[in-house]
Amino acid sequence: MENAQPCFSINDTHEARTLPPEIASVTVRKHGSSQSDIVWGVDLTAATPHFRLAPDQCIRYAAEIPDAIEVKAPEPLKIGEHYSVSINAFIESPQGKPDKIQNRRYLRDFCLSRSANASLEAIFVPRRSGKPAWEVCPTG
């Protein structure tokens, strides 16, 4: 959390620490009973210089990022709702690989809760048998 908003990062891998990926887009979706709706989205392909994200950095929900194109204005996030964030990125291929650039996609399910001191906190939802275990989330 940063400024009372979820803050999203990428996996902490050797690859990402060696050369942080270039972020192309960030999309947050709310999951309902039969569909998912985008609640915030940004396209970072026009950012100059290219927007790179190291594993120890994060992109705050609804952040205003220079040169980013807002695909969907942010909606307020609510306790008890189910969300996912998708970060689409590119890395330079290791030497000797035929493709110069490779795509990486980072996906995380989450929900919001109130802590004991009433501050907002993000709960990262584990996956069981390939599906989000939403039961870890509070109900509205």
Image (cartoon, rainbow, N blue to C red):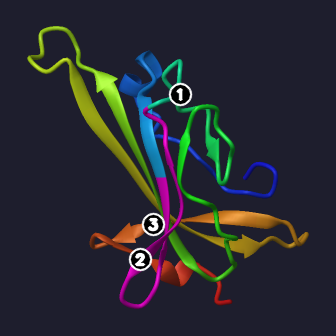
Along the polypeptide, which appears first: circle 2 or circle 1?
Answer: 2
Question: Residue 13 placed where, x, y %?
Answer: 41, 31
Q: Which image quadrant is residue 123 in?
A: bottom right
Mark 2 to mark 3: distance in Å? 18 Å
For numbered disc 3, what is the local secondary structure?
Answer: loop
Badge 1: how crowded within 10 Å, few (<14), some, or many (20+)? some
Q: In the rendered structure, which disc, 1 or 3, sits on the residue that comes first in sequence?
A: 1
Q: Where, quadrant-wise, is the C terminus in this rendering?
A: bottom right
Label 2 SS: strand
Q: What residue is shown with label 2?
A: 36
Between circles 1 and 3, the one closer to the viewer is: 1
Give percent across and percent down for residue 108: 46, 58
| Disc 3 packing (10 Å; few <14; some 14–19; many ≥20) | some
Instruction: Name the chief secondary structure element in magenta.
Output: strand
**Distance between the Cα atoms at labels 2 and 1?**
28 Å
Marks 1/3: CA–CA distance: 22 Å
Q: Amino acid at mark 1?
A: Ala
In the displayed structure, would residue 126 be above or below residue 12? below
- The label on residue 73 is none
Q: Which mark is residue 126?
A: 3
Q: Residues within 10 Å of mark 2 (few under 14, many from 20)?
A: some
**Residue of label 1:** 54
Q: Tell me if residue 32 is in the magenta stretch.
A: yes
Relative depth, front residue between 41 and 15: 41
**Stretch of the chain drawn in magenta:** 27-45
Dot 1: element: loop
Q: Is residue 111 left or right of residue 86?
A: right
Height in image: 37 above or below 10? below
Are discs 1 and 3 less than 8 Å apart at CB? Answer: no
Which is closer to the viewer, label 2 or label 3?
2
